Image: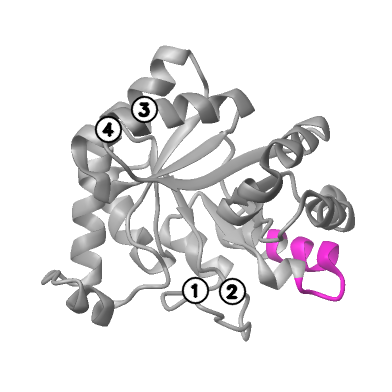
Amino acid sequence: MEKHETIVALDVPSAREAAAAVARIGDAVSFYKVGLELFLADGPETLRALRGEGKRVFLDLKLHDIPRTVERAVGSCLRYAPDLLTIHAQGSTAMVEAAARAVREAGSDAKILAVTLLTSLDGSDLEKLGVSRTVEEEVLALGRLAAAAGAHGLVCSPREAAALRAALGPDAILVTPGVRPAGGERGDQKRVATPADAIRAGATHVVVGRPVLGAPDPRAAALAIRDEIRAAAGA
């Protein structure tokens, strides 16, 4: 899998709007994220359309249930041939192992990514949940657990990417949402960084939604982010 790529989040409510966004972006992006909202509305149609245009798919459903249910759900997701598929690291070892087993037994090339801590959360949220560790400590603990259980990579905030890269080595896939160009609106994200910061911290992929989809010229916005990433990666 290529490194230092932009993944555009298709955070729209229908296949029609997703297709329109992809058309506006054109050849500037080859990797798209389909999350829960769009998948529940028009998942199969959207995924078929993306595949038909030769795009790669990040199926971001953040599966989190008992191990057997997650194993079966992963098997169902594989029919759409995603390149990346998310589960929650908080499901713990047995659940992550079950997800990895489903991919392995299917002979799929899909990569399981474990979500460490949502980028909408910060230290005060952890306190409310009764978690005494700091954000970085929690992310590192969950990241190590998921990697040991067979996850191919992690979803993390750019702010924790450097610590995870140091802990997990050069081969782990690190996908970072919560990426905003300099001066961009944070929205509902709390732990954010620029695309260049994310790449320099060790991210392999950055996920960007509103800064591209909401731009007057989505293709130009995507190209600017791509150029920023390449410069940060030394390409």
Q: Is residue 9 above or below residue 131?
A: above
Among the 4 quarters of the image, the one containing residue 65: top left
Q: Which residue is mark 4?
A: 67
Specify the amino acid type for callout 4.
Pro
Q: Which residue is mark 1?
A: 193
Image point (41%, 64%), residue name: 157
Specify the amino acid type for callout 1.
Ala
Of the numbered discs 3 and 2, the one sitting upstream in the chain is: 3
Image point (20%, 71%), residue name: 129
Q: Which residue is mark 2?
A: 180
Q: Which residue is mark 3?
A: 71
How busy is the neighbourhood of tag 2: few (under 14 within 10 Å), some, or many (20 plus)?
many
Q: Nearer the viewer, mark 3 or mark 2?
A: 3
Of the numbered discs 1 and 2, the one sitting upstream in the chain is: 2
What kind of element bears circle 1? loop
Left or right placement of residue 158 versus residue 45 in this view? left
What kind of element bears circle 3? helix
Image point (66%, 52%), residue name: 38
Span colored in magenta: 214-226
In this view of the protein, which residue sits in the foreground, 5 or 24?
24
Specify the amino acid type for callout 3.
Glu
Of the numbered discs 4 and 2, the one sitting upstream in the chain is: 4
Q: Nearer the viewer, mark 4 or mark 1?
A: 4
Specify the amino acid type for callout 2.
Arg
Q: Is residue 136 above or below residue 4?
A: below
Of the numbered discs 4 and 1, the one sitting upstream in the chain is: 4
Q: Give how far across and how far down residue 94 sits, in percent.
A: 20, 33
